[in-house]
């Protein structure tokens, strides 16, 4: 063990057991997986993604580019940093060889989010952040302080006075009523107007032994009047040959492991530095029992009795396999070691400042980029702003001499100086382009240790100053965030809210198979014993065409349009006239976008002189309401109209088929359902046992049909009454698949299935629904475009396979042979594609609808559709295949 008595903040009175790469080890509460592994002498944790080279733990926190592990227990999670995984009893992990793997079992842990508002948000609980939070609290402000480590203090983890300062400030903040202090919380995204996303790790890692009601992680959505960025700085390494071996880490990391976890990471230590900061770690490690030699690249160096210092000395190479065994200096000396610490200076952690487009400037004294401007509502303090308590600036050194192919810039990506040389040799000069060519800075650490070094090396190679190259763009998230945390509770059934009709329980009991339509769960078909979908649908279709069927059509969108100018509004959004519709009548209508392409279709009922009910498709209801509101509020605010969605207030049951009139007459004895008294495309109000009911003669099947509308509160009772009345006529519930077949047999298109955003009403054979009298409506001018009148446009037609057996797959391409019966050489021109395809009980054969180039002028032609490697011939026909005369509509 490499524990040192008298050091660390961990609880050594308790022991935790964990397994890594199949070997059992022990650690203590407060350990990370990295500190526990190092305490047990384990430095190599995996292999690199490209070359398979051994890789170890390179830093003590999120800046580590190499210590990537896979958690297996208590729940599999890939590509985590050992330095950020908090040790728990029973933890099982393994080193990652290149890539991790996703869990095979769904994660059942809870994740959630919380919205927080404050006057001042302070990010970072180091000395600068604690001071800023205390000042804001003393001003009486609402303060949120977030810090990503388990304990506050930042770099103040060493001596007693520093810890006393941290404890004093934390106690004062805890006593302030308007302060929220969140440790183990990483601010990973900073956005406009003081909006910050922060991830709180609320339980022990992966939540084992946590109460079920406690979420594993929580995303805090924080709105702050002022954001103080006190995120400190990240130590910068120096690039040299074979700088990727296990046992090479940042100098500050070794000090962190010592003071936080009581781990002495090496006994024979070499420190390679260009600045004074590394001496603190060197001296502390020597005091803990290590023999330390410092190689300082500067000619003038500090002097310490406890460490050996070599001035003007640099590392140019290393030796070892699974762990470093020695270093080679530029002077040719070889020094044995079991740990090499590197410090090339410090880079202000300015990522969150950059997220809100804060400009960075190059500071030649620091050899780093720091915030270079003031942003309203944002302050950057302490080391994050480039403020360091040092007397002598560092020597700026990006790399030493050596083989560029073995000088690693981004250790996680296996990207080398040689890769940068090739990028520059290919003519690339932009750091953004070179980043993408080499993949430097695209791994989990987002270039925390490699980004600025890459800029410096690029500048050297192209002969430009570093400020000319700049840095790559820092984007959220600052550190990786699990998709589960971003999803929060919106997972499974809550990912996209499921909407169900008032009859959902009845459909479930009836054995319905459901499909998702928009957000609705709709009954697709009702299989009897031994039936698959095709046989069930054929049975349901035959029942409707031959007797009577009933459908739950409650999901259709319903918009109540009221006001003196309601008719005028509808005239402007529909292609045909709606203002001339008489009260008590119904009209089919088509809506188009500005481009003249079909947006939605449906029916409109006129309820009163100043009131209409607009019926939309199920999936288009929200879009249509939004579309109408946008025009009403932004383009025509003078129109006196109000729009209200009543989709869920009304349940709708189409009763369809030759015996539908008998069923309606039996249920509503006071309603005259004859053709004369109740003509097609009309509606009437009635009641049943005192409950208001609206019945409409609308048909989406071509059959005699009545749509029964009732308040959703009474839907189950109404449904059962209709079923009871229709039982002697063999009434059959049918689902959406049967509805699709019935409508397709009549050539009624479904928007979104038979259209794709490039289809006009004329392409669908709905030119009759486009008014030639109205001066204007949305999309009208687009119909005059040359392309919209191109005779080669795709048009909706039917396709009937000549073998009367093959069901054409939806989405299949439609092609044709040349005049000589052969396919053209090279690419085969596509005439169109199949949009809908079904087996038909009425036709006794399969059929399809398709969009085909010049389709209506080609009726009678034979085309071919590739199916399972063969070409199936099919004849183009008109879109109405069943009852083209429309005789069945009136019974």
Image (tube, helix red, strand yellow):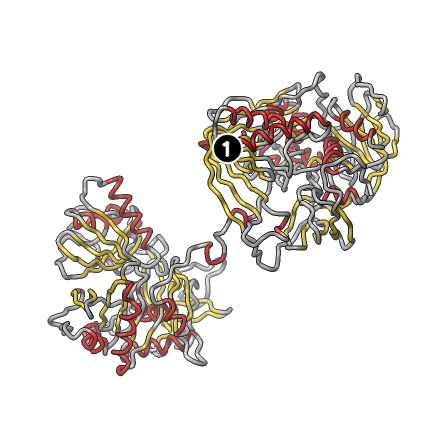
Residue 767 position within the rendered picture, expressed as x and y whole percent measured from the top left: 23, 57
The answer to whether one can see residue 481 in this image is yes
Q: Is 765 or 38 nearer to us in this picture?
A: 38
Q: Is mark 1 on a helix, strand or loop?
A: loop
Residue that mark 1 sits on: 177
Residue 17 position within the rendered picture, expressed as x and y whole percent measured from the top left: 74, 51
- Would you place residue 696 above or below residue 325 in this image? below
The image quarter in which residue 39 lies:
top right
Residue at x-position 70% and y-position 52%: 91
Residue at x-position 62% and y-position 54%: 102
Quadrant location of the C terminus in the rendered image: bottom left
The image quarter in which residue 244 lies:
top right
- Mark 1, Cα crowd under 10 Å, few <14 / some 14-19 / many 20+, is few
Residue ranking furthest to the bottom: 728
Residue 259 position within the rendered picture, expressed as x and y whole percent measured from the top left: 74, 33
- Would you place residue 510 above or below residue 569 in this image? below
Left or right, residue 94 beside residue 228: right
Residue 655 position within the rendered picture, expressed as x and y whole percent measured from the top left: 26, 72
Residue at x-position 46% and y-position 67%: 866
The answer to whether one can see residue 404 in this image is no
Residue ranking furthest to the front: 175
Q: Is 446 or 415 nearer to us in this picture?
A: 446
The image quarter in which residue 464 lies:
top right
Quadrant location of the N terminus in the rendered image: top right
């Amino acid at each position: 063990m490499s524990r040192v008595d008298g050091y660390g903040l961990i609880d050594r009175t308790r022991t935790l057991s964990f397994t890594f790469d199949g070997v059992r080890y022990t650690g203590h509460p407060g350990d990370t997986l990295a500190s526990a592994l190092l305490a047990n002498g384990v430095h190599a944790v995996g292999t690199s993604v490209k070359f398979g080279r051994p890789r170890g733990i390179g830093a003590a926190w999120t800046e580590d580019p190499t210590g990537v592990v896979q958690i297996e227990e208590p729940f599999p999670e890939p590509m985590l940093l050992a330095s950020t995984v908090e040790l728990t009893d029973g933890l099982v992990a393994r080193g990652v060889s290149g890539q991790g793997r996703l869990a095979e079992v769904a994660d059942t842990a809870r994740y959630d989010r919380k919205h927080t508002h404050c006057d001042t948000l302070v990010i970072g609980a180091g000395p600068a952040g604690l001071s800023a939070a205390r000042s804001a609290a003393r001003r009486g402000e609402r303060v949120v302080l977030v810090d990503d480590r388990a304990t506050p203090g930042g770099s103040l983890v060493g001596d007693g006075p520093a810890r006393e300062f941290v404890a004093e400030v934390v106690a004062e903040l805890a006593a302030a009523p308007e302060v929220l202090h969140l440790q183990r919380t990483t601010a990973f995204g900073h956005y406009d107007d003081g909006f910050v996303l922060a991830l709180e790790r609320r339980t022990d890692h992966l939540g084992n032994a946590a109460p079920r009601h406690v979420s594993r992680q929580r995303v805090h959505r924080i709105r702050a009047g002022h954001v103080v960025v006190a995120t400190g700085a990240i130590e910068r390494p120096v690039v040299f040959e074979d700088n990727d071996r296990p046992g090479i880490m940042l100098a500050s990391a070794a000090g962190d492991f010592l003071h936080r976890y009581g781990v002495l990471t090496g006994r024979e230590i070499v420190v390679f530095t260009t600045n004074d900061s590394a001496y603190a770690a060197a001296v502390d490690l020597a005091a803990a029992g290590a023999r330390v030699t410092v190689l300082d690249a500067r000619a003038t160096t500090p002097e310490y009795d406890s460490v050996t210092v070599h001035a003007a000395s640099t590392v140019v190479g290393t030796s070892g396999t699974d762990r470093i065994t020695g270093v080679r200096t530029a002077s040719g000396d070889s020094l044995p070691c079991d740990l090499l610490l590197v410090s090339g200076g410090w880079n202000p952690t300015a990522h969150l400042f950059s997220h809100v487009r804060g400009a960075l400037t190059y500071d030649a004294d620091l050899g780093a980029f720091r915030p270079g401007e003031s942003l309203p509502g944002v302050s950057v303090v302490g080391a994050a702003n480039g403020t360091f308590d040092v007397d002598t600036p560092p020597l700026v050194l990006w790399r030493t001499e050596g083989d560029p192919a073995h000088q690693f810039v981004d250790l996680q990506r296996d990207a080398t100086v040689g890769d940068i040389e090739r990028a520059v040799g290919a003519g690339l000069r932009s750091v953004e382009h070179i980043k993408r060519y080499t993949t430097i800075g695209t791994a989990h650490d987002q270039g925390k240790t490699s980004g600025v070094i890459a800029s410096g090396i690029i500048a050297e190679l192209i002969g430009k100053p570093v400020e000319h190259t700049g840095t790559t763009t820092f984007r959220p998230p600052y550190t990786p965030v699990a998709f589960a945390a971003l999803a929060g509770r919106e997972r499974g059934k809550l990912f996209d809210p499921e909407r169900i009709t008032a009859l959902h329980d009845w459909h479930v009991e009836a054995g319905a198979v459901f499909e998702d339509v928009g957000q609705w769960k709709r009954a697709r078909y009702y299989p009897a014993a031994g039936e698959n979908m095709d046989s069930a649908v054929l049975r349901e279709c035959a029942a409707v065409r031959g007797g009577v069927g009933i459908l739950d059509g409650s999901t259709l969108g319903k918009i109540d349009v009221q006001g003196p100018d309601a008719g005028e509004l509808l005239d402007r959004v529909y292609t045909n006239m709606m203002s001339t519709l008489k009260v008590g009548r119904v009209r089919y209508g088509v809506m188009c976008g500005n481009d003249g392409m079909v947006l939605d279709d449906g029916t409109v009922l006129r309820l009163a002189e100043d009131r209409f009910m607009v019926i939309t498709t199920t999936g288009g209801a929200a879009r249509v309401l939004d579309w109408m509101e946008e025009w009403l509020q932004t383009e025509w605010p003078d129109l006196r109209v109000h729009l209200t969605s009543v989709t869920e207030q009304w349940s709708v049951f189409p009763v369809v088929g030759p015996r539908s009139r008998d069923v309606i007459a039996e249920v509503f004895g006071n309603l005259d359902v004859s053709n004369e008294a109740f003509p097609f495309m009309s509606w009437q109000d009635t009641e049943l046992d005192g409950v208001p009911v609206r019945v409409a003669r609308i048909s989406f099947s071509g059959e005699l049909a009545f749509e029964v509308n009732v308040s959703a509160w009474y839907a189950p009772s109404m449904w059962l009454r209709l079923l009871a009345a229709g039982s002697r006529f063999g009434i059959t519930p049918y689902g959406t698949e049967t509805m699709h077949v019935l409508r397709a047999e009549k050539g009624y298109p479904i928007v979104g299935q038979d259209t794709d955003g490039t289809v006009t009403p004329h392409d669908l054979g709905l030119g009759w629904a486009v008014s030639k009298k109205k001066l204007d409506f949305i999309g009208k001018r687009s119909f005059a475009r040359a392309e919209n009148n191109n005779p080669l446009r795709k048009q909706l037609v039917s396709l009937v396979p000549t073998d009367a057996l093959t069901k054409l797959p939806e989405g299949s391409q439609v092609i044709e042979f040349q005049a000589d019966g052969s396919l053209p050489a090279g690419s085969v021109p596509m005439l169109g594609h199949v949009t809908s395809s079904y087996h038909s009980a009425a036709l006794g054969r399969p059929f399809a609808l398709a969009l085909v180039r010049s389709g209506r002028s080609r009726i009678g032609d034979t085309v071919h559709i590739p199916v399972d490697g063969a070409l199936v011939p099919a004849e183009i026909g008109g879109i109405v295949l069943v009852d083209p005369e429309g005789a069945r509509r009136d019974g």
